Image: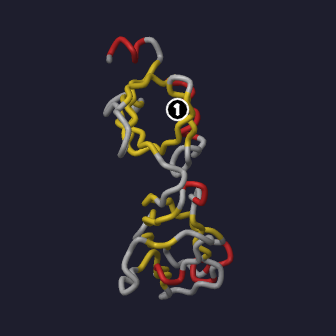
Amino acid sequence: MQALREKGSIPAVIYGKGHDNVNLTLSAKEFTKQYKSGALSAHLIELDISGKKEYALVRDIQWHVVKDTVQHVDFQFVDKGSEIKIDIPLSFINESKSPGIKLGGVLNVLCRSITVKCSPEKIPQVIEIDLSGKMIGQSIHINDVKLPEGVKFVAHEEENFTIVTIS
């Protein structure tokens, strides 16, 4: 493994139901570039494995604790015809349009991602939480969030947890 890393490669594995595990090597430079651009967080990736197109999601990235470099990547095979559960990052927009924040309120983020269920083709890159018009003392709950068509929350309907507050 160390020899691979010294040559600029990252060891990886891809696994999933109905598939044999496949060991891969990735270009460290290209993978890191894609990761930093945000293109891998909740994105269906097309891989060429022995001449066959396969689809996968990044499920885990192991980092070097000192160097902050990628040490290993786990991918999960995805069947394009099935629904999957995936964590989607939240993006808080329109802070400048929040009277509460303009008056000195502090944005307290309690949740940075949510788990959704959808087909691989419908995976949103990010879910936007609009802060415009929010005053000090107001909160945004999971039931306030609008999801794209074909995307559902995994949490139970009775769990209307708080995502963000302005205090």
Residue 37 screen position, x and y as percent: 60, 42
Q: What colour scheme has been applied to the protein in the rendered image?
A: secondary structure
Q: Is residue 86 above or below residue 54?
A: below
Q: Is residue 42 above or below residue 28?
A: below
Q: Which residue is mark 1?
A: 32
Q: Nearer the viewer, residue 55 or 37?
A: 55
What is the three-letter code of the residue carrying label 1? Answer: Thr
Task: Check the image and name the residue furthest to the front.
Answer: 18
Q: Nearer the viewer, residue 20 or 136?
A: 20
Residue 42 screen position, x and y as percent: 52, 52
Q: Is residue 70 above or below residue 113?
A: above
How many C-alpha atoms fall within 10 Å of the one at disc 1: few (<14), some, or many (≥20)?
some
Q: Is residue 117 above or below residue 144?
A: above
Q: Nearer the viewer, residue 66 or 57?
A: 57
Horizontally, is 147 left or right of 25 in the view?
A: right
Residue 15 screen position, x and y as percent: 37, 38
